[in-house]
Image (cartoon, rainbow, N blue to C red):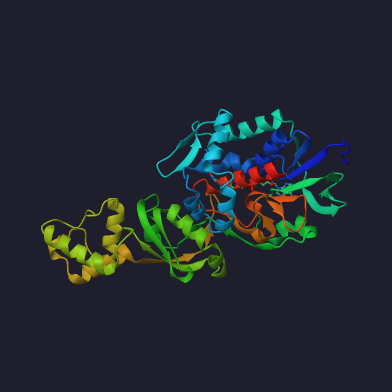
Amino acid sequence: MEKNTGRRVFAVIGGGAAGFFAAVNAARLHPDLDVIILEKSDKLLSKVRVSGGGRCNVTHACFDNRILVKNYPRGERELQQAFSRFSTGDTISWLHERGVELKTEEDGRMFPVTDDSQTIVDCLLAEADRYNVQILCKASVHEIIPENDQWKITFEGAMPALIADKVLIATGGGRNESAFSYLKNTKHTIIHPVPSLFTFNIKNKALTSLMGVSVSDAKVIIPAAKTETQGPLLITHWGMSGPAVLKASSIAARDLEKLQYRFDVQINWLGSGNAESMFEELNEIRKSEAQHKCDRSPFEGISRRLWEYFIGKSDMNADLRWGDTSNKHLRKLAEVLTRDVYIVEGKTTFKEEFVTCGGVSRKEIDFSTMESKLHKGLFFAGEVIDIDAVTGGFNFQNAWTTGWLVAVSV
Ligand SMILES: Cc1cc2nc3c(=O)[nH]c(=O)nc-3n(C[C@H](O)[C@H](O)[C@H](O)COP(=O)(O)OP(=O)(O)OC[C@H]3O[C@@H](n4cnc5c(N)ncnc54)[C@H](O)[C@@H]3O)c2cc1C
C-alpha cells in the first residue's frame, strides 16, 4: 500500500474520539494533506457509541480552565496550556456549527439534546466524508518505523506497509506495557498503565442487601492512599459505586494498584462533621425528639432503609425512643454515620466509564503542538498519553483538545 500521489500523507492510528477529531479537522484545515485513519477493529468510534450509558457525556460545563484542569489527576499542568487553545466552550461551538446541540445536566455533565451518542458518531462520520478522510478498518498497526524523514507503518497480517509523512498515535489506553509494543521503535517512555475509574467490591451482605440505595453527599476516605473525595455514593450488589467512589479510584489509581485493590475505606455518610460533633448533634436530637421513636432519619437525604441499617449497626432498636437512648448508643451511631469502615477486596469496571492511568510519558510531548520531542512528524492525542480524568465528560474533552492541537499543527 505504498502511497505515491505526490501529496503529503497524514496517517492517524486509531479510529476513536481523538483520532477522528484530529483527522476531520486536519483534513479541513489542510486541504493539501491526504488524511487516512487506520483502525484495528471493524468498528469506528466504538467508545463514543457506548459512552455515558449510550448518551455520550461529550464534555463538562466548566469554562474556567484553572478549575477544569483540577479534574485531571494526570495531566493537570500540561492541559492548562492545551485548554488555553481549545477548551470546553470550543467543543460546544464546534458541534453547534455542525448542527449538534448539547444540554447541561444539574451536575455539569453535557450530553447531546438527543440523549443519543449516535448523534456525535454521525457528526464525526459526516465530517470525515465531507473532507475525504480515508478510513481503513481491520488495519492493526504492528510497528511504526522512522525512515528518511517519513514513517513506515507495518500491520499485523498480510496488509502491505504504508509510508506516511506525519503520524498521529491515537490508540487509546492499554491494559499493560505490551499494549504499546507498536511504539518500541520510537523509544518513547511508557508510564506503567493501571486501571482508573472503578467501583469497590465489598463482601458485606448487610451492606450489599441495600443495593440501589444512594446518598447525595458522602465523604469517601482511603487512609492508606491518603485520598479523600466527596459526592454521591451508590450501594450496589457488589459493594460501592457512584461519583465519590469513582473519583477516589481515579485519584488513588496508582496507590490502589500497589495495594492490590485490598484496602480499608472510611465513609462519612453525611459528608461532614466528625464522631465528636455528630455525638453533640445526636445529643440535641435526643432532647428535642425525646418522645419520638428513632425509626426515621433526622438527617435529610438518608432513606428509611439506610437509616434502619445504621440503627441496627449501632446496636439500637427502631422502636427505641430518642429519650431512652444511652450515650453508648449515640456514640456508636455517631461513629457509624461519620466513620463507617469497610474492607475493599477487589474492583469492578462493569458498565462504568473506565480509563487507563499511564501511557506515553507527558514529558516527551510538546503540548503546544502535541508533537513528540523525540521525533519530528510524530504526534500523540487522547488517552494513549499519560492523561486521564475523573468522570463527567473530562476524558472526552482531553481527546477533543489534544486532537484539535494535532490538527492545527500537523
Ligand atoms: C464504557 C465507557 C464509557 C465511557 N464514557 C465516557 C463519557 O461519557 N465521557 C467521557 O468523557 N469519557 C468516557 N469514557 C472514556 C472515553 O471513552 C475515552 O477516554 C476516550 O474514548 C479516549 O479516546 P481515544 O480516541 O484516545 O481512545 P479510544 O476511544 O480508545 O480509541 C482508540 C482506537 O484505537 C484503536 N487502536 C488501538 N490500537 C491500535 C492499533 N495498533 N492499530 C490500529 N488501531 C488501534 C482502537 O481499536 C480504538 O478504536 C468512557 C469509557 C468507557 C470504557
Q: Image point 57% across, 41% down: which residue?
A: 50
| Rendered position, 78 above or below 92 | below
| Rendered position, 98 above or below 61 | above
Q: Locate the C terminus by quadrant.
A: top right
Where residue 245 appears, as percent x and y from the top left, is: 45, 57
Q: Pick the residue in front: 122 or 165.
A: 165
| Rendered position, 137 above or below 242 | above
Where residue 28 appears, as percent x and y from the top left, is: 70, 33
| Rendered position, 94 above or below 149 | above
Q: Pick the residue in front: 307 or 361.
A: 361
Q: How many marks?
A: 0
Q: Image point 80% across, 52% down: which residue?
A: 144
Q: Going by the image, does 367 lie left or right of 306?
A: right
Q: Pick the residue in front: 21 or 303.
A: 21
Q: Going by the image, does 345 lie left or right of 24?
A: left
Where residue 205 appears, as percent x and y from the top left, is: 40, 60
Q: Locate the N terminus by quadrant.
A: top right
Q: Image point 53% across, 48% down: which residue?
A: 394
Q: Image point 55% across, 53% down: which residue?
A: 80
Whether residue 66 is visible here, answered yes or no, is yes
Q: Pick the residue in front: 158 or 181.
A: 181
Whether residue 57 is visible here, answered yes or no, is no
Where residue 337 appears, as percent x and y from the top left, is: 30, 62
Q: Going by the image, does 5 lie left or right of 93?
A: right
| Residue, far left | 291
